[in-house]
Image (cartoon, rainbow, N blue to C red):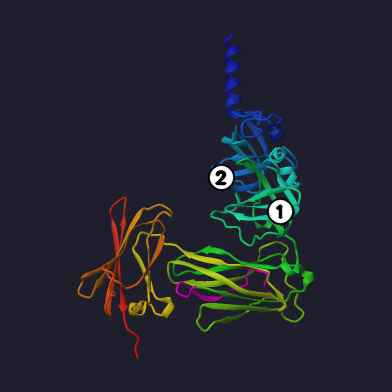
């Protein structure tokens, strides 16, 4: 009898540790409403299942596995400890959970890659009508395809809406690296295909494209768009910034393009272009403006050369190379663009280069852009000067205090225009050149003293730069 009891205990422990083997369909299928929406009938149970990885890098380290295409045959895995690749066939053991009506397998106790490089299950065609509150449950986790939908609501935060003129559904960015900004999305824009994986949150089923290649706009020669990426660089680095183009058909015969980009020359200088791994086969012509704050890029294909072609949306047309000089941000302003001279770009989306401060320091930059002078201004003529300051801190949290003091050449304090807790790594003040009594300072040299105080430790960093109050020479 003791032997039987022991065997039963061992079996129970084994099942608890290794889980009951279930297909994904068995884990997902339900017609029973519950809290949130339609929870799995196996919530709280430890299961072992397997499938092919169809999506990776979803919010908070989740990936998706599917046993086949179609309803009920895919599930999200909450497993930050493991990093599968697309096409891996994996076996996992974990606990079935529900998060506000969204089924996932979490608390993973066993993970094995059975094979790699497998073809992904075919996408499952759906309409927005399939993804409503009372119809979307069978598609949770499934890789789907929407066809011929148009934008009905432009991006609000992480999502926008599309419609087939009968029903609407939400497109969201859970698989995209964060922070992410939807750009180039306008009302009425038609998408030939939007592929993605379905999740459920806040009472709605949402399509989650895995990358830009999952989104294919309607190919129309009259709706070509250009977009410059937003990139992060380090101070002193030469950074490549991709210029992206919407889908291009070879039949359009495009052999020439031109566009203009403006930038902040205090922060960036234009270096060159890079056509490696881009759609542009030869180096374009470069025309830098006299003020060196904008550049025109013109490509003309050689006689008899193949037309430009991009099978996907957001193909890399060319890469721009910029050298960074200062901390801060520079917008990359697309102000004009055309193809084959006669086809105007229908949508231009600006980019940005960000150079954040990544070490503890007290940083100052003083400039007078309106009058093309570094640190000279005349407040007697109502001129102002910009004092930009920064340090390392957590964005959105007041971890540092900034104090800016202005001293005259005798070392006397004449103004304290800034005494604040910082909420951004780089902030700025437009100063009118007045002392603490509101009186315009006399002509002369002054010293701008910045102190950054760490509010947690009390440690401080300081730096000083001159400011000149000067009259214009006659």
Task: Give the magenta range.
Answer: 264-281
Mark 1: few/some/many CA within 10 Å (<14, 14-19, 20+): many
| Label 1 secondary element | strand
Q: Nearer the viewer, residue 268 or 220?
A: 220
State the residue at coordinates (68%, 57%).
213
Answer with left or right where residue 128 lies relative to residue 235.
right
Q: Of discs 2 and 1, which sits in the foreground?
A: 1
Q: Does 188 appear above or below 457?
A: below
Left or right, 445 with respect to 140, comes to left
* Residue annotated with mark 1: 194
Image height check: is 370 above or below 93?
below
**Residue 363: horizontal and vertical position, in percent?**
36, 65
Q: Position of residue 355 (x, y in %)?
A: 46, 65
Q: Where residue 335 appears, x then y in whole percent?
A: 60, 74
From this view, report whether residue 120 is shown above or below residue 252: above
| Residue 28 figure quarter | top right
Main SS category, magenta section:
loop
265 inside magenta stretch = yes
Residue furthest out toward the right = 251
Q: In which quarter of the image is residue 18?
A: top right
The quarter in which the N terminus is drawn is top right
Q: Where is residue 6 in the image (x, y as percent from the top left)?
A: 57, 15
Q: Mark 2 points at which residue?
A: 61
């Amino acid at each position: 009898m003791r032997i039987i009891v022991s065997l039963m205990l061992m079996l129970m422990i084994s099942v608890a540790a290794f889980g009951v083997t279930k297909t994904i369909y068995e884990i997902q299928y339900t017609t029973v409403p519950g809290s949130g929406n339609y929870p799995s009938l196996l919530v709280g149970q430890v299961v072992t299942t397997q499938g092919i990885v169809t999506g990776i890098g979803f919010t908070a380290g989740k990936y998706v596995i599917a046993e086949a295409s179609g309803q009920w045959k895919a599930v999200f895995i909450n497993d930050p400890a493991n990093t599968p690749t697309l096409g891996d066939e994996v076996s996992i053991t974990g606990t079935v959970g529900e998060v506000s009506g969204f089924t996932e397998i979490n608390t993973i106790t066993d993970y094995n890659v059975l094979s790699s490089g497998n073809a992904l299950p075919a996408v499952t065609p759906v309409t927005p009508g399939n993804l409503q509150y009372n119809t979307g449950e069978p598609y949770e986790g499934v890789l789907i395809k929407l066809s011929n939908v148009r934008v009905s609501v432009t991006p609000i935060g992480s999502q926008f809406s599309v419609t087939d003129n009968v029903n609407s559904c939400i497109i969201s960015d859970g698989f995209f690296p964060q922070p992410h900004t939807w750009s180039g999305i306008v009302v009425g824009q038609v998408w030939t295909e939007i592929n993605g994986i379905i999740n459920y949150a806040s009472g709605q089923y949402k399509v989650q494209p895995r990358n830009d290649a999952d989104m294919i706009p309607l190919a129309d020669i009259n709706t070509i768009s250009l977009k410059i990426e937003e990139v992060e660089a380090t101070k002193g680095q030469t950074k490549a910034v991709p210029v992206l183009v919407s889908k291009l058909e070879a039949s359009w015969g495009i052999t020439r393009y031109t566009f203009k980009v403006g930038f902040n020359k205090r922060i960036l200088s234009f270096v060159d272009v890079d056509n490696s791994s881009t759609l542009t086969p030869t180096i374009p012509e470069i025309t830098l403006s006299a003020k060196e704050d904008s550049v025109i890029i013109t490509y003309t294909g050689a006689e008899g050369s193949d037309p430009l072609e991009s099978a996907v949306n957001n193909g890399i047309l060319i890469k721009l190379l910029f050298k960074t000089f200062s901390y801060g941000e520079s917008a990359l302003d697309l102000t004009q663009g055309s193809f084959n001279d006669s086809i105007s770009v229908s949508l231009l989306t600006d980019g940005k280069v960000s150079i954040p401060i990544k070490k503890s320091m007290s940083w100052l930059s003083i400039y007078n852009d309106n009058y093309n002078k570094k640190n000279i201004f005349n407040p007697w003529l109502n001129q102002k000067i910009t004092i930009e300051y920064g340090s390392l801190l957590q964005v959105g949290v007041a971890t540092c205090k900034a104090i800016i003091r202005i001293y005259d050449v005798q070392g006397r304090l004449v103004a304290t225009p800034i005494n604040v807790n910082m909420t951004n790594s780089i902030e700025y003040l437009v100063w009118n050149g007045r002392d603490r009594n509101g009186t315009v300072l006399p002509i002369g040299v002054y010293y701008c003293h910045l102190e950054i105080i760490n509010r947690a430790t009390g440690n401080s960093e300081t730096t000083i730069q001159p400011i000149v109050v000067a009259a214009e020479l006659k």
